[in-house]
Amino acid sequence: MKIIASFNKMLGLPVPAMLFICWIGLLWAGPAMAEDAKLADIVVTNTRDHLLLYFTVTDCFTENMKKAIDNGVPTTFTFFVNLNEVRNWWWDKKIADLKVSHEIKYDSLKKVYEVRLSSQDDKVTVAKDFEQAKRLMAEIVGLKVTELRNLHRGDRYQINMMAELDTIKLPFYFHYVFFFLSLWDFETDWYSVDFRY
C-alpha cells in the first residue's frame, strides 16, 4: 500500500484509481509473454576466412507485442553467441564471445517498420509489413563468429547461442504505471553445437 501511495503522490491519482489501473494492466500484460521461444534451423558453416552461424528464433512474437510495436514502442532482441575450444584435461578455451542485437521501430507516418541489425553492421532495413519485419528480427544470417585462423585443424569446438527480448523501455511516466511489463521479457534456452574443425 505504501508503494501505491507513493505512486499516488507522483501521479496525482487517488489510490483506488491506481489499484484499478494496476489490476487492468496485469490482466492486459499476462497473455503478452512469448510462449516457448526457441532457436531453430541452426547451421554452423564457413567461408574461406570465417566461421559463420545461422539460426532463427521461433514463437517469439505475441499479438500484444505487435500492438505495442505498432504504437511506437521500440523492441530489441539480443543474441549471445560464444565459441569455445573443448579441451579434455583442462578448462575449455574461449575463442569468441559475441553480443548482437536487432531493434524494430514502427514509423507511423510512413507506415513501415525499420529494423536495425547490429549483426550486419547496424544496417537499417525497411519492411512494409509485419511478417517481413518479424523475419528480419528473428533471423541471424551469416554471423561471423571468428576468423578460421583462430581455429586449429583436428581440435574440437563448441558454439553456444541464446536469444532474449530486452526489457520494454517505456516513457518515464509509464514506468510507474506499467512496471509489470517485465512480464514481456523472454529468453530462450542455451543451444549448443559441437564440431571438429
Image (spheres, helix red, strand yellow):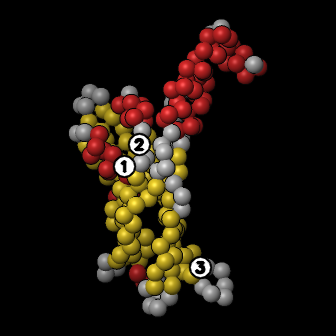
Up-down relation of residue 36 to residue 40 (above or below): above
Ranked by sequence position, the earlier of labels 2 and 1 is 2
Nearer the observer: mark 2 or 1; the answer is: 2
Hey, which residue is sitting farthest bottom in the picture?
154
> Is residue 101 at all visible to an observer of this figure?
yes
- For image coordinates 43% across by 70% down, the residue present is 145
Rendered image: mark on residue 22: none
Query: What's the amino acid at mark 3?
Result: Lys
Ranked by sequence position, the earlier of labels 2 and 3 is 2
47 vs 14, nearest the viewer? 14
Nearer the observer: mark 1 or 3; the answer is: 1
Ranked by sequence position, the earlier of labels 1 and 3 is 3
Return the x and y of residue 26 as percentages of the image width and height. Answer: 57, 26
Numbered-mark total: 3
- For image coordinates 35% across by 31% down, the residue present is 70
> Is residue 11 at all visible to an observer of this figure?
no
Query: What's the amino acid at mark 2?
Result: Phe
Q: Which residue is mark 2?
A: 61
- For image coordinates 54% across by 58% down, the residue present is 189
Q: Which residue is mark 1?
A: 137
